[in-house]
Amino acid sequence: FKKIIPVPEQSLVQMLCFLLECLLIPEHTPPDSHKDLYELYFVFAAVWAFGGTMFQDQLVDYRVEFSKWWVTEFKSVKFPAQGTVFDYYIDPESKKFEPWAKMIPKFEMDPDIPLQVGADVFVFVVP
C-alpha cells in the first residue's frame, strides 16, 4: 500500500499504543468489560495506526484497498458493509460502529440573517 509519507514500522506501533492509551479509558472500558470490547477498540486503533496514512492517487485509492484487505484478513470484528473501515467510529454508549456523519450536527440556515453578516454565525440543531 502506498502511504502519503514514509512511516517507520516502529512509529506505526507507537501510534497504535498512543491510540490505545486514549481509547482504553474507564469511561469506554469499565473494569467489568468483556474482552470483545477491548478487541473492538484494539481493531479501531490498529486500523487508524496502520492505515491512517494511506494515499489516494489518480488511479488507486489505497485507503479503499487497505479497507478491503483489512475486512478480508481480520474477521473477528465486523465492520458495517457500507463504506470503508475509515468511515466509522465506536460510539462510547452503544459500543458499536457508527458512521462519522452521525457526529455532525444538522445545519439550518436562518433566512433572516443576511449572508454577509452571518458568515461567522451558525445555528446548529442537535437532535
Image: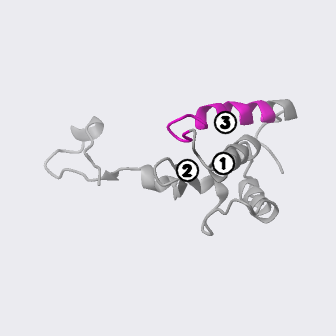
Identify the residue position indicated by label 3 in the image.
20
Q: Is residue 64 visible?
A: yes
Residue at 78% over, 36% down: 5
Image location of residue 3, percent across then percent down: 79, 44
Q: Disc 1 on helix, strand or loop?
A: helix
Identify the residue position indicated by label 2 in the image.
90
**How far separated are the C-alphas under marks 2 and 3?**
13 Å
Identify the residue position indicated by label 1 in the image.
44
- Please tell me in which quadrant of the rendered image residue 32 appears: top right
Q: Earlier in the sequence, mark 1 or mark 3?
A: 3
Q: Which residues are magenta?
A: 12-30
- Left or right? Give the position of 77 relative to 102: right
Image location of residue 91, percent across then percent down: 50, 50
Image location of residue 2, percent across then percent down: 82, 48
Residue at 59% over, 37% down: 23
| Residue type pointed to by label 1 | Phe
Q: Earlier in the sequence, mark 2 or mark 1?
A: 1
- Please tell me in which quadrant of the rendered image residue 4 appears: top right
- Left or right? Give the position of 83 relative to 124: right
Residue at 54% over, 40% down: 30
Q: Is residue 10 magenta?
A: no
Image location of residue 114, percent across then percent down: 18, 44
